[in-house]
Amino acid sequence: MGDAARCETGQLPQAACGPDALVLRGHSIEELCRRHSFEEVAYLLWHGELPTRDEIFAQNRAERAQRAIEPAIAAAIADQPFDAHPMDVLRTAVALLGASDPAGDGSPAANRARALRLFAALPAIIAMDYRRRHGLGAVMPRSHLSYAANFLCMTFGKVPEPQIVAAFEASLILCAGHAAGVSAVTSHAVTTEITDVYSAVAAAIEVLDSQGPRYGASGAVVETMNEIAIPDNARPWLEEALANGREIMGFGSWAGKNGDPRVRRMRAALGRIAALRSGQGVLEVHDALASAVYEAKGLHPSLEYPVGLAYRLIGFDPPTFGPIFVAACLPAWTACIAGPPAANSRTREVTE
């Protein structure tokens, strides 16, 4: 059965089925970005419907109570070599979380609790590793902050401007509904076949990490922007890259004739970040290269293109991009195991 038929029957994640597949559980990605938090999107993926006020309050209370990671796991992160890649550190920490979780109860409710534990812990793991590699001490989680604001606070030591928090949260929601080729399809298969949440997530991280550069297309986009430097260099750089057979990261034919709406939303968020981070030059290079690639190849940017630049302007280094993507994907990955019964079927997926 080809991929098109598998999309029609629900055997592939809808986010992997092309630019028109912009719906999570019957809700458009646009609507979710405009009206809902990343926490609510996670609930939607795990339970099949958006939460009531009481339901999201209960989930947030449980998640915020688990944000601090155990001392043994924090010590294991601190003991990692400074040149250890963040994806390796993250996979190790996930395995340690699994080792400290008593096995036995494999019910959907128990697996949802495990998924929520991972959901709560990943920002602390990612932020601790980021700060460790930059010679900074760990920042304790803040239980009064939203998921996105707490993630940024633990990474950078303070909560940035509200526009930055909102843009980062939008990126998490957009990436939750985004699939990047084979890695997303394989990760879906892995998390469907493995019934242990921790093992499934560790395996999905391995699959994602095995695709292309260690920090993915978003990191490669940052390298490209650094090479181009100014808008006037975009076309000459592209001509030389194409002449040398170089792959232009961050662009793809799957985005369709009019491009991916998720990219347009993230480009708008990137504009707001650039205005606050003196990033107008980056924005101009972004637009110049996008225009040049479309004229030369008829290709639109993929989501990784504006996401990578947004993360760099916020302050993340490229090696951290992959772990952030894992945090964004976690609810969709774990919904295959921890979601409602229909989500565990091989003929229906977490998106519908």
Image (spheres, grey):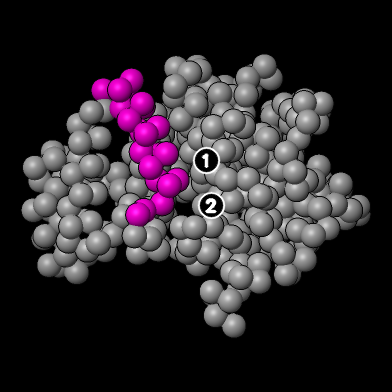
> Which quadrant does the C terminus fall into?
bottom right
Give yes or no for contact between labels 1 and 2 (Cβ–Cβ under 8 Å).
Answer: yes
Q: Position of residue 15 (x, y in %)?
A: 55, 57
Q: Which residue is mark 2?
A: 22
Instruction: Write down the quadrant of residue 2 in the picture.
Output: bottom right
Tell me which segment is drawn in magenta. 258-278
Q: Secondary structure at mark 1?
A: helix
Q: Position of residue 155 (x, y in %)?
A: 50, 27
Would residue 15 be found to the left or right of residue 96 on screen? left
Question: Does residue 268 belong to the magenta stretch?
Answer: yes
Which residue is situated farthest in the bottom direction here? 1
Identify which amino acid the numbered label 1 is placed on.
Glu
Above or below: residue 209 compared with residue 53? below
Would residue 343 be found to the left or right of residue 175 on screen? right
Residue count near mark 2 (Cα–Cα under 10 Å), binned few <14, some 14–19, many ≥20: many
Task: Examine the rendering and report whether any part of residue 250 can be seen.
Answer: no
Would residue 36 be found to the left or right of residue 221 on screen? right
Identify which amino acid the numbered label 2 is placed on.
Leu
Q: Nearer the viewer, residue 3 or 110?
A: 3
Instruction: Write down the quadrant of residue 337 in the picture.
Output: bottom right
Residue for point 28% across, 59% down? 299
Residue for point 17% across, 61% down? 296
Q: Position of residue 268 (x, y in %)?
A: 37, 34
Q: Position of residue 281 (x, y in %)?
A: 20, 31
Q: Earlier in the sequence, mark 1 or mark 2?
A: 2
Residue for point 30% across, 48% down? 221
